Structures are given as structure tokens and as C-alpha cells.
Amino acid sequence: MAFGMRHWIGVVLVGCALVAAAALPPRPPRIDGRITSSPAERRAAALGSELRRDQELLKRLRWQDSLPSLVVRSATDGVAVNGPPQVPDSVLVTIRGHVLDEKAKLDRSDPGVLFGYVLQPANQSEEPGVHAVPIFSLYDPSPDVMAGEVDGHAYCVEVPTLAERMLDRPDALRRALRYRYLMRPSDLIGVCRPVLRYGLPGPYVSSWLKAGASAFALAEDSTSTERAWRAQWDGASGALRAQWLGSLSPSRPLRACIAGRANACLREALVGRPRDSDGNEEIGTYIQTHSDFFVVPTRGAPPFGFAGAYLLSDLQTEFGPEAFGRFWRSSQEVQPAFHDAFGLDMDSWLMRWTRRNLPTYRPGPSLAAVTAVGLVLLLALCGGVGAVAAAKRSVA
């Protein structure tokens, strides 16, 4: 039987389907605990989550009630370093030395702001049999951060938590401290850096930070890192870009933002309601409205992914400390304060910043350039073979 044009068209369509199946990223498997867990196990998991939420809230209420006053009472030269009785004095002295070095390197500082670094047990307020999820150590510090005013003193306090195994082994704590500072530069001031430079933020900027924008103050000096990100991204294939998006699990606004929508960049920057480390919104709502906590460790990717940690630092570098200070201390809402301080709308600047610091992304399924060229050549080859076969039949 002659291989007619319709057969060739079928071959081309099948080839296109195979190319598309090979080029598109695989769908991640759906994980649903309800398939493998019983109703009793689900109720137990829900109860455990509620207990963790309550003990996390109780822990932070105790910290807010006691730690700022402790920092005010014990501060010397504007710095207080404290910890539970199990922490050796030599460890606290070492941490204090690093904190003083970091503070001395700030290009400017508000002398009225006290800084505290207060180590706390991670299992504080823990009920027997219900273990808190966030267990951090000096190997991977992810501290809570409080900033406010008590007894007429402005303060910013970092509260890293220590696992029980670290508290029970002072020698291990010393080794962890030495290891950390040998492996990477000291960064104990962290999110408190802009507070120490510019004082306490205005009320609306403060609410913005509590809602999650404090993640924008995690790092500074992004030039070399930014270039590395862009170089890696510009040479990446479509499959690697899809893998990047999947691994970071970016929010919908971030996906739209890196696709070129300025209003989506603004939604990502204004962030939403904070969650606690177990994914509960109740603690996040309390933190945003009733407490001095700026930071509570959370799961999931921060706004703008890893690049977001440099956002406030980039603002200071681009517009200067005086303009940034006006924005930071403004009594207006975040967007008007941004415009008054920097002279342009927040969404416009965010779109420009995103293009410099994040990879661009074309939404929807697409093929890499090499795959697209190969597909065109395949179509041309199939069309040519079909034309030759048709011409031979006509001659015959």
C-alpha cells in the first residue's frame, strides 16, 4: 500500500507529540496523606499541629514579656548578649566580640537603639510528647527578631534557639561556634541592621516588615552574587529554568512578576499575612498586630526568592542613606512613603529591580531554542520526503 500524504502528516504529528513530551517538564507527583492515613491518624496530626501552634505562641509571649527588659538591664556599650545557664560564658564572650565587630562596621548607626542577642532553648513551653518543629542550632541559625521600645529605650533583639542536644553539651556548642565562624563571615546583627542604622521604622513600614517584608533585610552587598545568578540563568536550558521555578515554588505573583507584570511585582513585595513555622496563620496574625516580632522562621520560599534578601540593601545603595531613612521612618503607608522618599512609584522600581536581579520567564509551555530548530528541520525533512514521494507517483 502506498504511503500517502495523510500518512506523512500523521508521522509529523506523532513526531511533534514526542518532541513536546520530551521537552515539557514532568508533572510532580501528588502527595496526599489522606490516601494512606486513617481518620484517627489525621485527627492526631491535627491535634499535634494545634498544640505546636499554642506552645509556639506561648513561647513568644514569654519572650516578648521578658527579653526586651533583660536587654535594657544588661546592655553595655549598646549591646547585650545573654543565654540560658547551660551556655558557657566563653561562648557568650565570643558572640559579643563578633557583634561588636559587626556593629563597628556599620556605615552609620542610631546610638539610641540597643541590640540584643539572646540565646533561648528551642523546647521552651514544650508539652511532653509534642515536639516543636523549629529546632535550630548555631550550625543553621534562623532567629526570631523583635524590635520596639521598652522603658523609653529602643531595641532590636535577635533570638536564636538552641536544640536540647546543644545545651546539654557545652563542648559541642563551642565547636559549633568555631565551625560557623571559620566557614562563613559573621552575620549576627541580621535583620536588626536597618534598625540600628535608622532607628525604629514608622508604623506602616513596621506592619509591612511584620507581614513578611523583613525577609528583604536579610543580606547586603549583592553585586557578586547577583552576577553569578544571572550568568547561571542566562546559560540555562528551558528544563533547568522549569526546575528552578519548581524547586523555589514561587508564588503566583512572583511568576507573573518575572513574566513582566509590574502590578504582580508590587503584590509580591507587599507580601501577605505571615505564618508561623508550622504553617498556622493565627500566630502570624498575632505577630503582625499585637507584638514586637519582626521575624518568625517560616516555611516556603521568601518573597522574590533568594534575591529578595538584598532588596532593602539595594534600595540604600541606589538612593542613598538619607532617602532610605526618610522611607524607613515615614508615618505614611508603604507606597506613598516610597514615592515621597525615592521620587518614583514602588511598582516601577520593583519591575526594574526584578529585571536586574531575577531571571526573566515566559509563562506557558515553550521549547528550548535547540529543540525548536530541530523540530523545524524535522518538519522540513518530512515535507521534503513527502513531496519527493508524491512527485514519483505523479510521474509513474
Image (cartoon, helix red, strand yellow):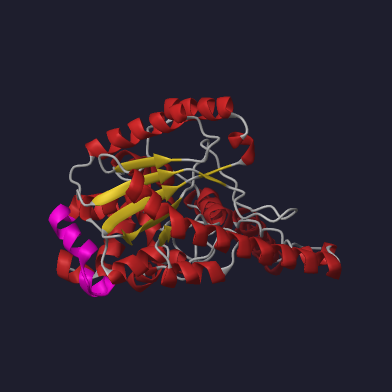
Front one among 194 and 361: 194
* Quadrant where the image shows the C terminus: bottom right
Q: Is residue 317 visible?
A: yes
Q: What secondary structure predominates along the stretch shown in magenta?
A: helix
Query: What residue do we see at 39% from left, 40% from top?
Result: 81
Q: Nearer the viewer, residue 12 or 69?
A: 69
Name the spot of residue 122 as percent of width and height, x first: 58, 47
Magenta includes 205? no
Of the pair 11 and 93, the residue shown nearer to us: 93
> Which residue is pictured at 31% across the width and 38% down the height?
224
Relative to 326, does residue 312 appear above or below in the rendering? above
Q: Which residues are magenta?
A: 319-337
251 versus 130 height, above or below: below
The count of marks equals 0
Q: Position of residue 134 (x, y in %)?
A: 59, 51
User: In x, y percent, where is residue 267?
Assistant: 39, 71
Q: Is residue 335 magenta?
A: yes
In the displayed structure image, the side of residue 151 where residue 130 appears, left or right: right
The quadrant holding residue 253 is bottom left
- Can residue 218 be seen at all in this image of the molecule? no
Residue placed most toward the observer, 1 or 236: 236
Q: Which residue is painted at 26% across and 60% down in the image?
A: 152
Q: What is the x, y in percent for residue 352?
A: 27, 60
279 left or right, relative to 349: right
The N terminus - image quarter: bottom right
